[in-house]
Amino acid sequence: MTKHTEQWASRLGVILAVAGSAVGLGNFLRFPGQAAANGGGAFLIPYFCALLLLGIPIGWCEWTMGRYGGLKGFHSAPAILGVIGKGRVARYLGVIGVLIPLCVYFYYVFIESWCLGYCIKFLTGGIGIDVGAPIAEQAKASGDFYTSYTGQTGDGALFDGTHSVLWFWLITIALNTWFVYRGLSKGIEAFCKWAMPAMAVCAVVVLIRVLTLGTPDANFPERNVVNGLGFMWNPDFGALWNPQTWMAAAGQIFFSLSVGFGVIINYASYLRRRDDVVLSGLTASATNELFEVGFGGMITLPAAFIFLGASMTIGGTFGLGFNTLPIVFAHMPLGNVVAAVWFFMLFLAAITSSLSMLQPVKAFFSEALGVSNAGATVITTAISLVGCGFVMWFSGGGVALGTIDDWVGTFLIVVLAAVQVICFAWVFGARRGLAEAHRGAQMRIPGFIRFILLFVAPAYLLFTIGWFCVKTLPGWWSAATANTVAVMSLGLVGAVVLLLVICTAIGEKRWRAEGLDLDGREGLPDEEEGSVRR
Amino acid sequence: MTTLGWISLLGSVGFVVGLTAWCYKRVLTLPPEDA
């Protein structure tokens, strides 16, 4: 077996890397839309309940499982879940923990290149919005630019030789590959230790600009900063009686914290035996919340409201980010500079996330096939280029991207989280798991979290999966089977699953031949000695 | 912006800023890690 000597260089480094993985476009673009559509300020009540009762506890599970698996010599989700879940079923379900980061990377890195491309566009004059034209024409200009720039006009449109986004995509791919090849501490950790503070500085710059806008258009005195904040934060407590609000809040926490993604379990596997996971996990989650609530909740919707009013401020993640906000920046004093800073910040948020998608995949191929760091990087890059190429060629209407995002980036995340929580609480044992979490911990996990992990989290996750299967999946399936590109996209995902299963089978034989405890039959030598440091 | 809006805004942002500051204060004042 290839010996994995990679390790984090510092505890701050691993915290910033996990936080960087969690902070992404959704913090700035999805959260505000969800909050405004589900009760405004009242949405934060179920949101914080979900954070404290689901997000942070499940995150602690992943940190603990990752470190435990790493001590057994494993760094990939299939191998680690095989140890925690004590056998083959959990090991093969763990394949989802490699499938998700790999398939999401197929399209995420493309979106990442849009951010870089928009940043450069605004630095060099903007995207051609005429602020003197009627607002409908500005919206059309912004929408047309976005549709053309991202190749949604038709399949193969990006490859007609006129699309600069291809160059930004190549730069983005090269950066990701380089940092992952450099390794954990010299690549990912070193980059995140620079990128996370830089992201915070960019966010503060944009926040100050938004909060000092006053009333920019005297013809619309009601469109001012205070009312913009009110549009986002005024609570509608009636929304709390709607179960959908609570589901939306839990869903937002889930996707935002990167739990069930296969990333934390991999990152934590490089920790040492007595490295803290409890305070580190909480700090990474808190950092994510600072970006989401503190910046995402104060910038995006208030800025859109101030210039465009309430009618144009709600849109999906991409609609808000790449259609609406460019119009807002076009109207804003110093708008091109602020827009460049904003899209550069989104680019940093995206690349710290995409790096965290490549590392678990690289670790998997390295330990399953026994190849070197360079070999695993080449395999990972080759597969991701095929997937990225597919998503970019079939860019018409964003069908390929949307299909993979729905089935893998949305549904399977909940499935993997359920597998992880059940393995941790019911197979490995909640009491044993929490004792393991407390090994070297800098703070104590409250006692009621055991009850949460045993009953509340699995019930919520299984209910969500059931709800999805009954309410959502039939619609997705009908839409997918009616569209050739969607069918091909699911075929691509199926081919990746097959490849990962074969590699897991190869790895299983190798690990067994090497005498590794791949079914978790033996505890660690001092497993009963877990204690909280004071 | 209503009074409850201000309470929601300041309470939420205050909570995440406070939690983040408390966490980083703990992390950054820990003794150096063992080699």
Image (cartoon, coloured by chain):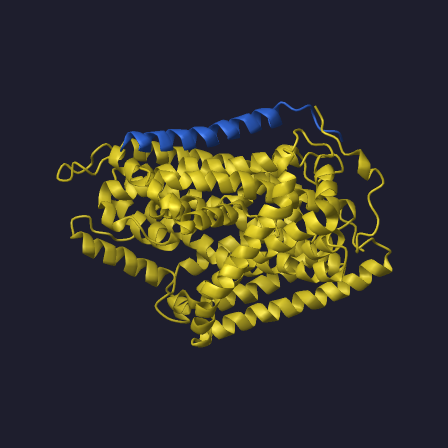
Instruction: Please give the name of the residue rendered at 56% of the width and 59% of the height, measured from the top-left corner.
Output: A412
Instruction: Please give the name of the residue rendered at 48% of the width and 62% of the height, measured from the top-left corner.
Output: A406
Measured from the top left, where is residue A216 in percent x and y? 20, 36
Camera-nearest residue between A492 and A305: A305
Q: Is residue A410 visible?
A: yes
User: Which image quadrant is residue A17 in?
Assistant: top right
Camera-nearest residue between A257 and A244: A244
Query: Is A250 situated above or below A152?
Result: above
Q: Is residue A84 left or right of residue A252?
A: right
**Image quadrant in which the C terminus of chain A is located:** top right
**Image quadrant in which the N terminus of chain A is located:** bottom right
Instruction: Please give the name of the residue rendered at 52% of the width and 48% of the height, measured from the top-left corner.
Output: A254
Q: Is residue A529 left or right of residue A474?
A: right
Q: Is residue A394 visible?
A: no
Camera-nearest residue between A151 and A447: A447
Of the chain colours in the picture, the one used for chain A is: yellow
Camera-nearest residue between A481 and A513: A481
Instruction: Please give the name of the residue rendered at 61% of the width and 38% of the height, measured from the top-left corner.
Output: A281
Q: Is residue A433 left or right of residue A155?
A: right
Q: Identify the chain drawn in blue.
A: B
Query: Is A289 situated above or below A360?
Result: above
Q: How many marks?
A: 0
Measured from the top left, where is residue A252 in percent x and y? 46, 48
Q: Residue reaching furthest left?
A: A219
Measured from the top left, where is residue A113 in percent x and y? 45, 54
Measured from the top left, where is residue A54 in percent x and y? 55, 44
Q: Residue reaching furthest front?
A: A241
